[in-house]
Image (cartoon, rainbow, N blue to C red):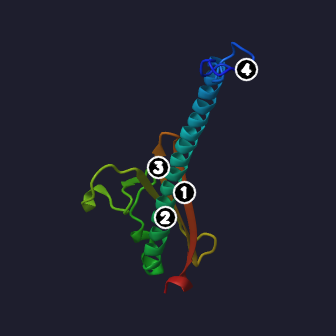
Amino acid sequence: MPENAPAGVSRAGGDPAGFTLVEILVTVVVIALGCLAVLWMQAVAMRGNSQSEHLTVASTLAKSEIERLKCFPFEDLKKAVTDTESGVPINREGLTQTQGGRAPRPYTRTIRLYEKQPTTRSHQVEVRVAWRDAHGDHEVVYTAVLTSDSLN
């Protein structure tokens, strides 16, 4: 290469030694696609985190209600089931509006008692905790058989 040749000119004469516009555009497109993929992964991770949080809270609410019902004598179990089949709005601590919690109430708890099922000395209790989010309706159902032997 001659000593007086301008900087950036190759030995072949005329081709710049830097990047072409096409190479830069391809690089920008590849980086943009990578950034979009990372943003999409972040959105999916946040949705999964929200779903798992709701599932954990709903499971805890259903389990704690079954544990509460286990504290009652077998004869009083029907009186202990105070919720209706239509469901009672509750918050993540299991409190209803009348218990001093504050809105929003994303969960609905429904308790059904099947007397003398599966035997005459037992009752089947079904606790449903449901919620609605941007992705639809969801629910967790826990069932327990409480016997006269286990509650007394």
Residue at (46, 54) in percent of width and height:
85
Q: What element does badge 3 sit on?
A: strand
Front in this rendered view, residue 78 or 32: 32
Q: In this view, does 103 lie to the left or right of 4?
A: left
Q: What element does badge 4 sit on?
A: loop
Residue at (53, 44) in percent of width and height:
42
Density class for disc 3 (Cα within 10 Å; few <14, some 14-19, many ≥20) is some
Q: Name the residue under label 1.
A: 140
* Label of residue 11 in the image: 4
Mark 1 belongs to which amino acid? Val
Marked residue nearer the N-terminal end (4 or 2): 4
Q: Name the residue under label 2.
A: 62
- Whole-number angstrom distance, CA of label 1 to CA of label 4: 73 Å
Front disc: 1 or 4? 4
- Whole-number angstrom distance, CA of label 2 to CA of label 3: 13 Å
Residue at (49, 51) in percent of width and height:
50
Q: Residue 33: x percent and y percent?
A: 61, 31
Q: What element does badge 1 sit on?
A: strand
Quarter of the image where one finds residue 96: bottom left
Q: Name the residue under label 3.
A: 131
Marked residue nearer the N-terminal end (2 or 1): 2
